[in-house]
Image (cartoon, helix red, strand yellow):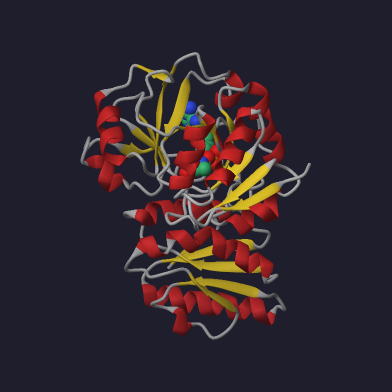
Amino acid sequence: METKVFIVEDIEKNLDYIKEGANVIKNGGTVAFPTETVYGLGADALNEEAVKKIFIAKGRPQDNPLIVHVANKEIDYLAKDIPQIAKDLIRDLWPGPLTLILNKKDLVPNVTLANLDTIGIRMPNDPIALKLIEEAKTPIAAPSANISGRPSPTDVFRCVQDLTGRVDCIIGGEKSNVGVESTILDVTCNPPCILRPGGITLEMLKKYNNDIYIDKAVMNKVEGDFKPKAPGMKYRHYAPKAKVRIVSGETKKMVEKINEIVHNYIDAGLKVGIMASYETRECYNKGEVIVLGKREALNTITPNLFESLRALDDLGVDIIISEGFEEVGLGIAIMNRLKKAAAYDIIYV
Ligand code: TXA
Ligand code: MG
């Protein structure tokens, strides 16, 4: 399959690229596009055959439902029984990194929603994404634009790497500035429940209902035949080729432990990558050190998280040791992604 790649530098000047992408969607094809969270791989959410192509391109399990992306806040045609809290969140936080799980109406086919009675809907905060959806005149189903199991792409280069020859079109825009996928909030239950932490934090959501909580499958390993509410949470995710380990705890002890582990691996002949922070970067003198961002401003860390995993893979490291982060605010989303990348291999010091 030939994959067209369009780089949109200026949304007005390059409107034709977006229109061409929208035509691909209208004709049942697949288009990767930027969003503020991660790049998405889109198809017409209402077209069964088109949606099937997404699953094939990504190698995604069929039982993992897709999020439906919209360009405006009017979603009555997609969902029913929309509770007041959902209306308030839509009013205040859309467009933005928040997916709401609602009771579905019958318009969206089962392939898109993996036979669930619910639908995940989100309005992305990216001008290219919004224009693409608007021009396609249909909601767009879009998972992250990576091959299943790999870290999500936060720039167009990574989409091209993963999806060339597998999709019809890739539209490039800015780097994703949130860098982790949207927060998924199930509002079909009371109190609402976070199924995946993301750019909209628990603390922000608690302002709407103080009882909102995080599903217990989010931060801990899912064992045996336990069925998480977001089917995607049971799969190994965000995994680079290298093995990942996390060391978490008080900064001084954490740095000491990481240095000890790194030295052992290097002595054993392995190539080691370290995911450090701005504050600690000088503390490591062996291995490939990548700075994620500032510990004191976690929104500088999230945009680099997935890219750092991929960049260390490119350097051919055998093992990646990442610093851990306190699980508050954006730290919850960061640790959720890191733990999955590490298959829960975490050392607390
Ligand atoms: O930020 C995002 O949400 C990105 C961008 C592209 O918008 N999309 C994304 O999609 O992360 P994906 O497919 O990688 O992750 C979707 C997650 C999966 O874990 C899936 O199981 C869950 O959302 N999900 C979708 N619909 C659901 C539903 N009706 N009920 C429960 N979980 C659902
Ligand atoms: Mg994904």
In this view, which residue lies farthest toward the right?
1
Residue 347 percent across, percent down from the top left: 49, 63
Residue 227: in sight, yes or no? no
Q: Which one is in front, 33 or 232?
A: 33
> Can you tell which quarter of the image residue 26 is in?
top right
Q: Quadrant of the N terminus?
A: top right
Residue at (72%, 78%) from the top-left corner? 269
In the image, taking residue 337 as reference, residue 170 lies left or right, namely right
Q: Is residue 288 above or below residue 304?
A: below
In the image, taking residue 132 as reference, residue 72 lies left or right, namely left
Residue 203 percent across, percent down from the top left: 26, 47
In this view, which residue lies farthest toward the front?
13
Q: Is residue 44 above or below residue 41?
A: above
Q: Which one is in front, 234 or 131?
A: 131
Residue at (41%, 37%) from the top-left corner? 123
Residue 326 percent across, percent down from the top left: 36, 60
Q: Which one is in front, 201 or 160?
A: 160
Q: Is residue 81 above or below residue 317?
A: above
Number of numbered markers: 0
Residue 35 percent across, percent down from the top left: 48, 47
Residue 189: in sight, yes or no? yes
